[in-house]
Structures are given as C-alpha cells and as structure tokens.
C-alpha cells in the first residue's frame, strides 16, 4: 500500500450553474462559489471538482466547450477564477477542473473552420465520413438519442457526435489534436490548478474500422458508447498525456470511464501503469436499469449492489484505486433513489448511505447538496425539464414510440432525470432557497423550506454534521482510507455489512437499507460480539436489533 494525498482526499463536486448566484441573474457563478468556500472548509472536504466553467453555448450545460482557455461569461471572468483558486488554496482546498476533450462545441473555432471546407487545416481535427448508400456512415446511435452522425451540407459529409449534435467528437488519431489538448492542459497546470476530472475519457479512441454494430438502443441504433468504450488506442493516448502533462505536476486525476470493467480499470488507474489516479466506473449506477436503459421503474436489488461493490473493492485492492460515489450531476439524488426521502426516514437513510460509501476503500466524492440530504424533484410536466438527455428520452418514449404514458414517464423522470441533481443548492429558507435573488434557471425544490444548509450547519444531528464527522474520521483513521474490505452476509437482501482491516486494526460496518427492524445475521452478530466501541452511528442509543435505516461502525 503506498500512501498519497489524493487517496486520502475527500472530494466535493460543484455544478456551477446551480451552486450559488452572486448577481441575481438566476445562474450560479464563480463569485458565488467563492462566497461559499468557508462553508466547504467547515464541511472539511479537501478537493473541489468543478464542472465545466469554460466558455460554452451551454447546449449541454458547459460540456460543449467553445474556448478551453476562457471562462463562460455568465460564470464570471478569468480574474474571478484566479481569485477562486487563491481562495481555495488559502483554505487548504485543491481545485480539480473538468476536462472535456472527447468533443468540443460546434461553436469552437476548430469546428467552425473544420466544417467550412474539406481543405481546412482543421478538417482532421474532427471525424468526417461520406454517406453510405445515401444514409449515415454507420448505424451508431448517440448517447443522447438519435443517430451519432450529423449531415453537414457545406461539404456533403457527416461528422461524428457521440453526444448532442452540437458536440462534435475530436479526432484523437490526429497527433496535432493531441498536442493542442496537451498544450491547453499544461496552460491550466501552469495557472496552478490541481488536477483534472476527465469527461468520458474512455470513449476517445474510435475503432479502426467503422462498421455497423448490433442494434441495442430504444430507437433502433447501435449504441456508440458500447463501440468506442476502451478503444484500441485509449491507453496509448493516456500514457502520452501522462508523459506530456500529468507526470510534470503533482495532480489529482480521475477518468470518467463509461463501459469500464475491473480489468480495464487496472490499466487506466493501475498503481504503475502511468495513466490516471483513479476512474469513475458505472456498473453500480446501472443496477436499477433494464432494456429501457435508465428510463425504468426497476428497483435496486441490494445483493446486486453488494456483489458489485465487493468486486471493485477486492479486485482493485493494492493494484489500482477506487473512486466512491453515489451522486453526481448525471445521477438522481441517492436519498430518493436507494434511501427513503419520506419525512420520517430521510435523515436516517441519508446518513446510512453516507456511511456505507465513506467506509469503503477509495476516494469519496460528495455531490453538492448530498451533505444536506437533498432529494429528487417532483417533475410533473416537460416545461420543468431542462436536460437534453431527458427531453430526448421524453420525445422518443412518450411522443414517438408511445411506450410510456405521460404519467408513467414523469414518475420515471422524477426518479431518474439528471435534472434531479441540477436543481439549485438549498442554502436557507428564504425565497429560492437563498440561491438567487432573481429567477433561478431551474426551479428550486419546494422542500428548501426545511431542507437547507443554514438549518443544518449548527445542528449536531443533521446530515451535514454527520458528513462532517465522516470526513473527520477518514482524516484521522488510515484504516478507512487504506484498509482491506471483506463482505459479510452476501445474500441478505436488506442488510449491507462488511469488515475493514489494516494490520491489527479492524472495523465492522453495518447498514440497514430498509425501514424494517431486523435481527443481525449470524456472521454479523458474531463480529459485533467481539467489537469494542462505536465509531459512528445514526441512532443515539445502541440496540440489539437493527432499526430502520440504522447504520453503525464498530471498532475492535
Ligand atoms: C459526461 C458528463 C455529462 C455530459 C457528457 C457529455 O458524461 O458527465 O454531463 O453530458 O459527458 O460531455
Ligand atoms: Ca449569476
């Protein structure tokens, strides 16, 4: 086990558009983030990952970048960014930037040039192909629905876009593109940033031969992400990035790797493979999906989750490094998803879920508002929805294919849409939750009147105070960061329990994922009988049974 700061970090993720608005235009901004740095310091996190702040037409909320070296006007200026960096550093907080280099915006000057003529020197910055039999070059479907190819009249060719039409894919086969990207990354490192979260980095290397794949999407395409994930040159490209940029600085690096398996993760984030520090894997996030992808009411079956986490915990141990997350800007709120957001159980289940995740081996990520137990939003009609992925799904599943009624679809949207995570941060019980004095770009969840930061910061029993304690414990106990993991009662459908060990030290973590009162399974009870003290728990008094959503961590 080698020890290092990024393994010991606790990361907090900010979605800038929804975090804090300083000037009343309804859009969160950098001065807003600066005004909350003390809040973040109080929570105790050590690294901030901020979703894209760069200049962008905002077709996909900043993941469509038109200038990598400028700040989006609505978020502020480069001076504001520098002030944020300095303010964070003064408080011992590092700043990790989102790096979106699988694609750019169609407004990026490279693409504007590229599409203008086949002779442009930027033509090969992107992926252009002729029509095949008068149709798209292949049957690949984009991650946001529809074809992954867009016809462009000017030059009578198609360009590839794995995401929105306005997000053309860069051509990583072109060494000039790679150099442009690496130069830009070095420029940010010289400015003093502390790392990168790399957007869909597992999708940058496209296949050698472009051909039709098996049809596996709702709208009759072959999902492009399945075709490009972990492409044949991706590790070569990342090793080159490591040589040209990452190895020159002491950085925090995490790759968002859809389609990553444990075997692949060991290459991306292996202790000695010279690529990244860690990856985000998606397997656990897909456990409540089905043939409709995420757009389904399917419930999580707890043993599936345990089996999946256990595989990642055990197989990366000593070889690579896990990132631990429940929530991010692409996922619904965990307390509503796998906890219980009723008045009775919201606080208990939010604490239980926090414990389960933060007691594993890896680097934990907290998404803004998770530390308050913020919930999903009661979406009732499409005008309340902003997200491009969600709007496209509504179009396909309700309007075009009539697979779901309005009512069913909105039930599902309230469970799964990315907008659930993107509603504004709830700071206090004043109008708009204190997020803005103007009209928020996306509605604030009406429950801001009782779920908000102000009411939790000084309440020792709040979700906030509990997360603060989880972070504090991790800072003071190496076993929480580095200890090995072993699962107890694998088949139990209601209880998730595991042990952590480091040298002579041991921890027992018990989580009740239901609202029932349960007896401890025998292997858990046996361990508990040998335990000494309680390290953290979400009930005030100990008990012999496991109460609704109870969690306890024992030391020995
Ligand atoms: C990643 C981002 C997501 C974005 C997509 C395209 O999955 O997390 O928000 O829409 O990439 O950039
Ligand atoms: Ca603003």
Image (cartoon, rainbow, N blue to C red):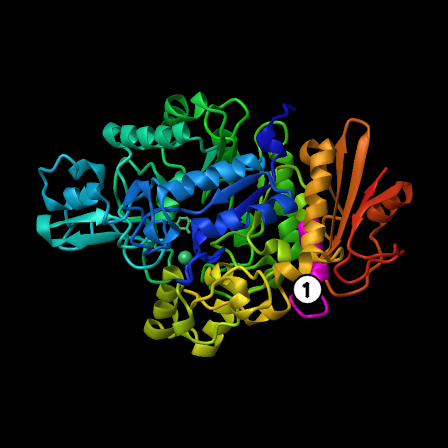
Going by the image, does 450 lie left or right of 276? Answer: right
Horizontal and vertical percent for residue 508? 79, 42
Q: Is residue 206 above or below residue 373?
A: above
Going by the image, does 545 lie left or right of 451? Answer: right
Q: Is residue 233 visible?
A: no
Q: Quadrant of the N terminus?
A: top right
Q: In the image, is residue 353 part of the stretch drawn in magenta?
A: yes
Horizontal and vertical percent for residue 407? 47, 78
Q: Quadrant of the C terminus?
A: top right
The count of marks equals 1
Give the secondary structure at mark 1. Answer: helix
Q: For this rendering, which residue is in front, 461 or 405? A: 461
Our reading of the magenta stretch's main secondary structure is helix
Residue plotted at (17% across, 54% down): 151
How many neighbours does mark 1 have within 10 angstroms: few (below 14), some (14-19), or many (20 or more)? many
Residue located beneath label 1 in the image? 346
Q: For this rendering, which residue is in front, 189 or 421? A: 189
Residue plotted at (31% across, 42% down): 70
The residue segment tinted magenta is: 341-355
Horizontal and vertical percent for residue 304? 62, 52
Going by the image, does 412 lie left or right of 350? Answer: left
Residue plotted at (65% across, 35% down): 314
């Amino acid at each position: 086990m080698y020890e290092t700061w990024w393994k010991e970090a606790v990361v907090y993720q900010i979605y800038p558009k929804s975090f804090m608005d300083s000037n009343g235009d309804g859009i969160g901004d950098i001065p807003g983030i600066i005004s909350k740095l003390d809040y973040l310091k109080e929570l105790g996190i050590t690294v901030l990952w901020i979703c894209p702040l760069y200049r962008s037409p905002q077709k996909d909320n900043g993941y469509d970048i038109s200038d990598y070296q400028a700040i989006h006007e609505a978020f502020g200026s480069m001076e504001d960014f520098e002030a944020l960096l300095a303010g964070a550093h003064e408080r011992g907080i590092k700043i990790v930037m989102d790096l979106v280099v699988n694609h750019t915006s169609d407004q990026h000057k490279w693409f504007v040039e590229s599409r203008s003529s086949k002779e442009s020197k930027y033509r090969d910055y992107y992926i252009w192909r002729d029509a095949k039999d008068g149709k798209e070059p292949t049957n690949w479907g984009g991650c946001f629905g529809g074809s992954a190819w867009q016809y462009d009249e000017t030059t009578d060719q198609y360009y590839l876009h794995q995401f929105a039409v306005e997000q053309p894919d860069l051509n990583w086969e072109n060494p000039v593109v790679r150099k442009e990207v690496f130069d830009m990354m070095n420029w940010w490192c010289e400015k003093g940033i502390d790392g990168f979260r790399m957007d869909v980095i597992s999708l940058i290397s496209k296949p050698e031969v472009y051909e039709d794949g098996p049809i596996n999407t709702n709208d009759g395409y072959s999902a492009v992400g399945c075709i490009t994930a972990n492409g044949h040159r991706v590790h070569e490209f990342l090793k080159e990035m490591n040589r040209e940029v990452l190895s020159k600085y002491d950085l925090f690096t995490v790759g968002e790797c859809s389609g990553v398996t444990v075997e692949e993760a060991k290459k991306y984030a292996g202790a000695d493979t010279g690529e990244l520090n860690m990856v985000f894997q998606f397997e656990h996030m897909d456990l409540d999906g089905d043939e409709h992808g995420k757009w389904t009411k399917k419930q999580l079956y707890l043993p599936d989750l345990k089996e999946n986490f256990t595989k990642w915990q055990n197989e990366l141990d000593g070889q690579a490094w896990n990132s631990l997350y429940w929530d991010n800007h692409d996922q619904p709120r965990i307390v509503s998803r796998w906890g219980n957001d009723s008045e009775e159980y919201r606080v208990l289940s939010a604490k239980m879920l926090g414990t389960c995740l933060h007691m594993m081996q890896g680097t934990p990520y907290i998404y803004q508002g998770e530390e308050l137990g913020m919930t999903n939003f009661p979406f009732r009609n499409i005008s309340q929805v902003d997200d491009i992925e969600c709007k496209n799904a509504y179009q396909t599943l309700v309007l075009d294919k009539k697979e779901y009624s309005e009512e069913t679809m909105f039930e599902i949207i309230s469970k799964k849409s990315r907008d659930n995570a993107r509603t504004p941060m709830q700071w206090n019980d004043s109008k708009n939750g204190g997020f803005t004095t103007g009209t928020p770009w996306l509605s604030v969840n009406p429950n801001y009147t009782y779920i908000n930061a102000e009411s939790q910061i000084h309440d020792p029993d709040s979700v906030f105070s509990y997360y603060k304690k989880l972070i504090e414990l991790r800072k003071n106990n190496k076993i929480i960061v580095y200890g090995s993991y072993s699962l107890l009662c694998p088949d139990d459908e209601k209880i998730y329990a595991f042990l952590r060990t480091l040298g002579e030290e041991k921890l027992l973590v018990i989580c009740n994922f239901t609202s029932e009162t349960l007896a401890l399974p025998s292997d858990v009870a046996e361990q508990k009988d040998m335990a000494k003290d309680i390290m953290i728990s979400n009930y005030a008094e100990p008990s012999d049974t496991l109460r609704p959503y109870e969690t306890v961590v024992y030391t020995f």
